[in-house]
Amino acid sequence: MKKIILLGIIVSALSSKAQVINPAILDTASSIHLGKISIGAYVDTYFGADVNEYKSGNRPYFVSSARRKELNINLAYISLHYHSDRVHLRVIPGFGTYMSANYAAEPAGLRFLVEANAGVCLSKKKGIWFDAGIMGSPFTNESAISKDHLMYTRSLAAEYVPYYLSGVKLTLPLNKKLTLYLYGLNGWQKINLNQYGGAGATQLELKINDKMLINWNTYIGNERATATDTKRMRFFTDIFWVYNYKKFSVTSCAYLGQQWYYKNENKLWAQSNFIARYRFCDLFSLSGRVEYFYDPQKEMIVPVTNVKGGSIYSAGLSACFHIDEHALVRLEGRYFNATQKIYRNQNDEPINQSIMMVANITAWF
């Protein structure tokens, strides 16, 4: 039995290197396979610091790795997965500062579920599946799982789209390279359905070859709720690209969102990012990111300094030490420059610029 388990781990590790994966979808964790059941675990620890000071201890505008000047757990989870030819189910309870920040608006009994879904195969021959429950989001080229990404921290793009979705998903392989996913959802990162109706989304995934992937998503939903009665329909689309070749990896994402309001008021926001990594050897790699976030009407980013909205430019550098196939140590620095004074300095004065540093250890099986 031990030899079988070890062989399964080795095969999983080798296959993840050989093929490009979709980094926006949580289904890449290594696992111990016991027949039709897979068990996995993941722990993401970090220590963050800023040149700026924040009285709350939280870095504003982020839900991932947002605590400052303390060692903490961003995300830790246990993954339980059952898979057969006709049925699969996944339960992932999670804990950490990411869960506390990102699930705060959910009902108390559902705040610790990274995923909880079940699916049935409608056509084994064509690979058609129907899933229902809480599932990972396809939006942007980054998910909550840092090990799957070229940088440790998430770009602003990922922080302002759903990290998880609640509803149903239909998987429709169109050919060997192209897969269409159709979603019926409770809303924009909402586990419970609000009283005014749900939302729909599409995902088109093109795996050009084992090195390159292109993903295009769309979203439309009614954002009206008791707390936001003036909001109406939200429209959103994003496209991202992933390319891996030998020691070099790159990904880029761009999106555009529009929020309609009562009396025909509309608000737009957009972003773009580019991330690249070069692996010098099996033990060390270096990654860099540049990004731009545009939100002049404060639809997504509401400044803590009560100024008007604008744009944010950012650049970052990350050094990654690959301990083995199941552990990473990362050191990362990021610089932000905003068109408005949305940050605060050590004297609590509004400023345009901000610098953050973070150290991280991630391990999984």
Image (cartoon, rainbow, N blue to C red):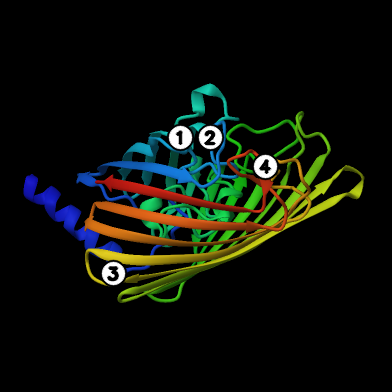
To which residue does mark 3 refer?
18
Please report the residue visible at 53 percent of the width from the left and 46 percent of the height from the top: 163
Determine which quarter of the picture holds residue 231. Answer: top right
| Contact, mark 1 vs mark 3 (Cβ under 8 Å) | no
- Distance (Cα) linking label 1 and label 2: 6 Å
Is label 1 in contact with label 2 (beta carbons under 8 Å)? yes
Q: Is residue 202 left or right of residue 16?
A: right
Per the image, the residue denoted by label 2 is 101
Proximity of marks 4 and 1: CB atoms separated by less than 8 Å:
no
The residues bearing labels 4 and 2 have C-alpha atoms spaced at a distance of 25 Å
- Which image quarter is the N terminus in? top left
**Sequence-earlier tag: 4 or 2:** 2
Marks 2/3: CA distance? 35 Å
According to the image, label 1 marks what residue?
97
Give the alpha-carbon distance from disc 4 to disc 3, as whole Å: 50 Å
* Res. 350 visible in picture: yes
Q: Earlier in the sequence, mark 4 or mark 1?
A: 1
Q: Secondary structure at mark 2?
A: helix
Is residue 27 visible in this depiction of the protein? no
The residue carrying pointer 1 sits among few (fewer than 14), some (14 to 19) or many (20 or more) residues within 10 Å by Cα, namely many
- Spot the residue most to the top: 108
Mark 4, secondary structure of its residue = loop
Q: Amino acid at mark 4?
A: Glu
For marks 4 and 3, the one nearer the N-term is 3
- The x and y percentages for residue 206 are 49, 70
Residue on which the image places disc 4: 349
Q: Amino acid at mark 3?
A: Ala
Residue displayed at 54% across by 41% down: 59
User: N-terminal of the two: label 2 or label 3?
Assistant: 3
Along the line of sight, which residue is nearer the eye, 351 or 361?
351
Q: Which circle, 4 or 3, is nearer the viewer?
A: 4
